[in-house]
C-alpha cells in the first residue's frame, strides 16, 4: 500500500536520477534509447510484489549519503543512501542494509526477518516452517522455539553483515525469514544432540547442506545469513532448551498410558526419556534478562522499539524517503 501511495515520488526520483542506474535518464541517453523516462504504474508495483514480474526484487535508485548519531532516531541527513525503492517506504524502513542503514538503526537486524520480496518468497518460507516437525515447538516449549527463531534472525543478519564489509555488497538490502528458519534447524540439532539421537542429527545436517548448495546456485541468496541463523539457533538450543533424562515411571509396563508426549516426539527421544526444564544449562529467562540489560546499557539499542513503531506510524521517516510522499 505504501509503495503505491508514494509511487509519484518514486517516479520523480527515477526521472531525476543520474546515478548510472539502468533506468536512469543518463543511462537511457548514453545507450541511444529514447530520452523519455519510464514511469512505473501501480499495476507494475503490485505485480512485482506478487512475484509475477521481475522476480519481486524491486528496483533501487541509490545515491550518496551521510548519517548522524546525534539525532535521537539515527535519521539520515543529507541525501539518502537509497533515494527510492519500488517496494515502497515501509520496506526501506525495515529492510537490513549492513551499511549505513543498519549500522545506525539496529531495529533492522530484527525487522528485516518479517519482510519478503514477493508472495513466492513468502510462500517458500511458510512452506519451510510448516515442514518442521511439530515436536520442535510443542515438545521443547514455545518459549525456546520463539527465542531461537527471533535470535536466529538477528545472528543471521549479523553474519550477513560480517560477510559484506565493504563496497556495493555492504549497501545491499537483505530481507526474509530464512535466517530464523535455519535457526529452528539449529534448535532441532541441539535438541537431538541432547537426546543422543545421532541418526536424526545426521538428517538435520544433510538438510542444511542442501540448503547451502541451493544458496550457491541461486543468485541473491545469503548463505552467510543461513549459517549465522543456524549457529544462533543451535547456541540458544544448546544453552537454554530442556535437557533429557530417563523416567522409571515411563519404563514400567504401563508407562505408555502415563506418557504425555506425542508419537513423533517420543520416537525422537526414545522410550522412557522425557524433557526436563531443570536440566537446561541455563534457564531461558537468563537469555531475555541479558538482552534486556544490553538494550538498557546501549543508547543505539534503546532506540530499537522507537524504530519499529515509527516505521509503522511514519513510513519512510527512518530511511529518509518520507519527503517523496509529499
Image: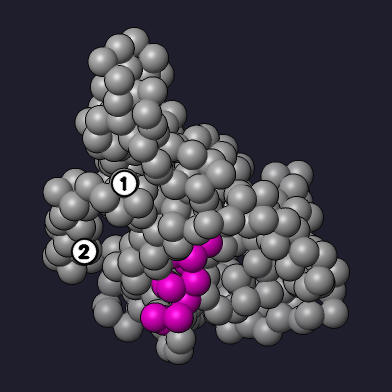
- Residue displayed at 75% across by 53% down: 305
Tell me if residue 306 can be seen: yes
Residue with the most extreme bottom position: 166
Is residue 163 one of those drawn in magenta? yes
Q: Where is residue 201 drawn, in percent x and y?
A: 21, 52
Q: Which mark is residue 195?
A: 1
- Which residue in the protein does label 2 denote? 212
Quarter of the image for residue 296 reads bottom right
Tag on residue 131? none
The Cα–Cα distance between marks 2 and 1, rounded to whole angstroms, is: 26 Å
Q: How is the image coloured?
A: one colour
Against 204, residue 120 (above or below) is above
Residue closer to the observer: 247 or 293: 247
Please, is residue 36 above or below residue 184 in the view? Answer: below
Tag 2 secondary structure: helix
Q: Is residue 215 above or below residue 42?
A: below
* Residue mark closest to the camera, 2 vs 1: 1
Q: Is residue 321 above or below residue 204?
A: below
Q: Position of residue 9 (x, y in %)?
A: 61, 56
Tell me the SS state at disc 1. Answer: helix
Q: Residues within 10 Å of mark 2 (few under 14, many from 20)?
A: some
Please name whichever residue, 259 or 313, is drawn nearer the observer in this view of the structure. Answer: 259
Query: Which comes sooner in the sequence, label 2 or label 1?
Result: 1
- Asked where in the image residue 70 lies, by quadrant, the reply is bottom right
Residue at left offset 40%, top offset 59%: 234
- Bounds of the magenta segment: 153-164
Residue drawn at x 38%, y 31% as measured from the top left: 247
Q: Residue at x 34, y 10 (%)?
A: 257
> Is residue 321 inside the magenta stretch?
no
Query: Residue 295: image x %, image y %?
Result: 76, 64
Task: Tell whether label 1 touches label 2 (CB within 8 Å).
Answer: no
**Magenta span: helix, strand or loop, mainly?**
helix
Amino acid at each position: 500500500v505504501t509503495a503505491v501511495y508514494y509511487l509519484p515520488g518514486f517516479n520523480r526520483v527515477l526521472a531525476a536520477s543520474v546515478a548510472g542506474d539502468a533506468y536512469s535518464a543518463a543511462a537511457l541517453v548514453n545507450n541511444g534509447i529514447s530520452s523519455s523516462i519510464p514511469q512505473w504504474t501501480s499495476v507494475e508495483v503490485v505485480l512485482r510484489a506478487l512475484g509475477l514480474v521481475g522476480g519481486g526484487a524491486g528496483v533501487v535508485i541509490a545515491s550518496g549519503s551521510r548519517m548522524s548519531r546525534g539525532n535521537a532516531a539515527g535519521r539520515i541527513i543529507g541525501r539518502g543512501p537509497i533515494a527510492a525503492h519500488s517496494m515502497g517506504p515501509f520496506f526501506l524502513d525495515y529492510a537490513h542494509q549492513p551499511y549505513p542503514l543498519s549500522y545506525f538503526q539496529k531495529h533492522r537486524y530484527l525487522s528485516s526477518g518479517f519482510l519478503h520480496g514477493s508472495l513466492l518468497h513468502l510462500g517458500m518460507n511458510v512452506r519451510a516452517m510448516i515442514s518442521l516437525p511439530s515436536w520442535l515447538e510443542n515438545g521443547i516449549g514455545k518459549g525456546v522455539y520463539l527465542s531461537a527463531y527471533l535470535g536466529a534472525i538477528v545472528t543471521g543478519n549479523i553474519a550477513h553483515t560480517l560477510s559484506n564489509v565493504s563496497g556495493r555488497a555492504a549497501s545491499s538490502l537483505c530481507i526474509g525469514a530464512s535466517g530464523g528458519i535455519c535457526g529452528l534447524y539449529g534448535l532441532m540439532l541441539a535438541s537431538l544432540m541432547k537426546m543422543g539421537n545421532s541418526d536424526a542429527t545426521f538428517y538435520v545436517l544433510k538438510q542444511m547442506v542442501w540448503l547451502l548448495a541451493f544458496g550457491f546456485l541461486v543468485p541473491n541468496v545469503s548463505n552467510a545469513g543461513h549459517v549465522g541463523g543456524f549457529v544462533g539457533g543451535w547456541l540458544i538450543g544448546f544453552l537454554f532448551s530442556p535437557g533429557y533424562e530417563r523416567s522409571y515411571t515411563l519404563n514400567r509396563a504401563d508407562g505408555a498410558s502415563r506418557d504425555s508426549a506425542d508419537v513423533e516426539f517420543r520416537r525422537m527421544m526414545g522410550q522412557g526419556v522425557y524433557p526436563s526444564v531443570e536440566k537446561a544449562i541455563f534457564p531461558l529467562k537468563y537469555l531475555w534478562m541479558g538482552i534486556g540489560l544490553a538494550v538498557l546499557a546501549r543508547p543505539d539499542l534503546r532506540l530499537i522499539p522507537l524504530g519499529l513503531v515509527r516505521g509503522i506510524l511514519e513510513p519512510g521517516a527512518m530511511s529518509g524517503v518520507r519527503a517523496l510522499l509529499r
